[in-house]
Image (tube, grey):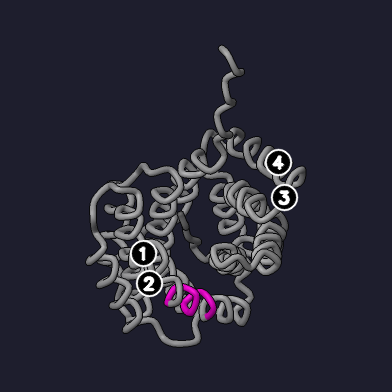
Amino acid sequence: MAYTAMSGTGTTSGDDPLQTAVWRLRSRACWADAAALIPPDSAAGAIQRAALLVERCLYTEQGWQDAEDALRSAEALAHDDEERGAAACERGQLAYAATLHGVRDRVDEARAALGRAAALIPPDTAGRALLDFRRGLLAENISRSPHAARAAYRRAHTAAAAHSDSLLLSFTWRHLAGLALRDGEMAEARHGFAESLRIREELGYLVGTAPALASLADAETDPEASRLREEARRLFRLLGGVPTWLARQLTPPPTPSPTGV
């Protein structure tokens, strides 16, 4: 199961203090607290608030109505094409998340919203990189089209590198590695997962570090795989069981009963 990024700011020492505070909360799974810091009276602020609350839905499977309300506010405040495109991208992501988590089938809405975003967001922008990544998620996990997903992830990867978007790069590395693992390309998978983990540790993206550890474990052999999974479990418990979907991946297999018992 694949999950996504919101392209972030506040990750370097020279960033705006507000964005730095938002990043620190977000990276520790405190999305509602992060959103509360952002003034909601501008299109940019409203879109960022909506994006944070949409991301909370992805990681916690909760807060759907809060995300919907924030998204409607962002859509109402968006005035130019780039703002409307960014809001549509979040609309598509929320619909994708609801479909992926089995809340409600909103796949048609997700496709329509991401298609609308593609018509509005200019090429060669950071917003386009995030959009391409999200279209890759839809292709991989809803349409079940790994070839289309790989093409979208590669476009996003190239654009993220061009815009120095390290967080998004951590996601494109991870998802390209996941496709390589599916194809049995173990060296490529290990490299991609290791790069994703390295970036997340450097950024202090704590909520994304446990999934990165678990993914790398899937491409390793014991004893390294067991060490990575145990570290992932430690972080998962530290964050109170977030992301929720990681529990299934980290649950150890049941211990067989002794013979004759």
Find out whether residue 150 is within the magenta segment: yes
Q: Are marks 3 and 4 in contact (CB under 8 Å)?
A: no
Q: Which residue is mark 1?
A: 90
**Which residue corresponds to the image point at 33% horizontal and 58% vertical from the top-left?**
94
Q: Which residue is mark 3?
A: 221
> CA separation, marks 2 and 1?
6 Å
Q: Which residue is mark 4?
A: 226
Of marks 2 and 3, the one in the foreground: 3
* Amino acid residing under circle 4: Ser
> CA separation, marks 4 and 2?
40 Å
Of marks 1 and 3, the one in the foreground: 3
Of the numbered discs 4 and 2, the one sitting upstream in the chain is 2
**Which residue corresponds to the image point at 46% horizontal and 44% vertical from the top-left?**
245
Q: Are marks 2 and 1 in contact (CB under 8 Å)?
A: yes
- Prevailing secondary structure class for the magenta stretch in the rendered image: helix
* Amino acid residing under circle 2: Ala
Of the numbered discs 2 and 3, the one sitting upstream in the chain is 2
